Image (cartoon, grey):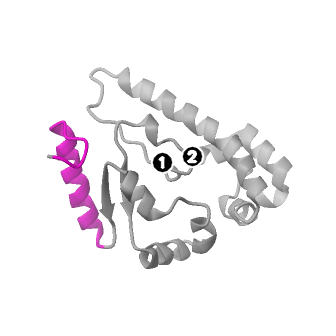
Amino acid sequence: MRRLYSEPGVVSAVRKRFGPGVIDAGGAVDRAALAASAFDDPEALRFLEGLLHPRIGSEREAWVTAQRALAPPPPLLVCEVPLLFEARLEDRFDAVLVVTAPDDVRRRRVEARGQDFDGRAAHQVDEARKVAAADMAFVNDGTLDDLDQWVGAVMARFRRGVVNGAG
């Protein structure tokens, strides 16, 4: 949904709320600059959630509808929702899978992207709660091959009709 940050209505609302310093040279929202402004301000975060979450929900619904209209429809639809629990959207899906990692691994990955781990984590549901609420979870502290193998096994389970941890 990153393209939402280029939509004129979103750009205009963000520019009005945060100023021109969060708009990049191409006229889109500079997500890093916006994050630096928004994560320290609860009102700003609520503003962004109110602006973006309805649009994201509409985009997801339109995508699901379009996929189901295909002939034949795909046997499985997967949506990546980084703030699923924070936005309280988990009940909108048939199954919830969580890919997590220990805090030190997550910190290293977030900081490698030039982002503030503690600032982001302060606004997120605790990883243990996410894992407990999920139908399936994977601790992603290994290689991409490890993750690929887990995804393959999960896909096989879904093809067999096994959605939860049983089977």
Please, what is the three-letter code of the amino acid marked with disc 2?
A: Ala
Q: CA distance from mark 1 to mark 2?
A: 9 Å
Q: Is residue 114 above or below residue 28?
A: below
- Going from N to C along the chain, the mark reached first, 1 or 2, is 1
Q: Nearer the viewer, mark 1 or mark 2?
A: 2
Q: Does 134 lie within the magenta span?
A: no
Rendered residue at 43%/29% (across/down): 64
| Residue at mark 1 | 81
At label 2, counting other C-alpha atoms closer than 10 Å, the crowd grade (few under 14, some 14-19, many 20 or more) is few
Which quarter of the rendering shows the N terminus?
Answer: top right
Q: Are marks 1 and 2 in contact (CB under 8 Å)?
A: yes
| Residue at mark 2 | 87
Q: Does 160 lie within the magenta span?
A: yes
Q: Is residue 92 above or below residue 16?
A: above
Q: Is residue 52 above or below residue 29?
A: above
Q: Is residue 49 left or right of residue 138?
A: right
Residue 106 image position (x, y, % from top left): 46, 72
**Mark 2: secondary structure:** loop
Q: Is residue 114 visible?
A: no
* Residue sitting nearer the eye, 12 or 149: 149
Residue 92 image position (x, y, % from top left): 45, 35
Q: Is residue 136 left or right of residue 87?
A: left
Q: Is residue 108 left or right of residue 54?
A: left
Rendered residue at 60%/73% (across/down): 118
Rendered residue at 36%/51% (across/down): 134
- Extent of the magenta region: 142-166
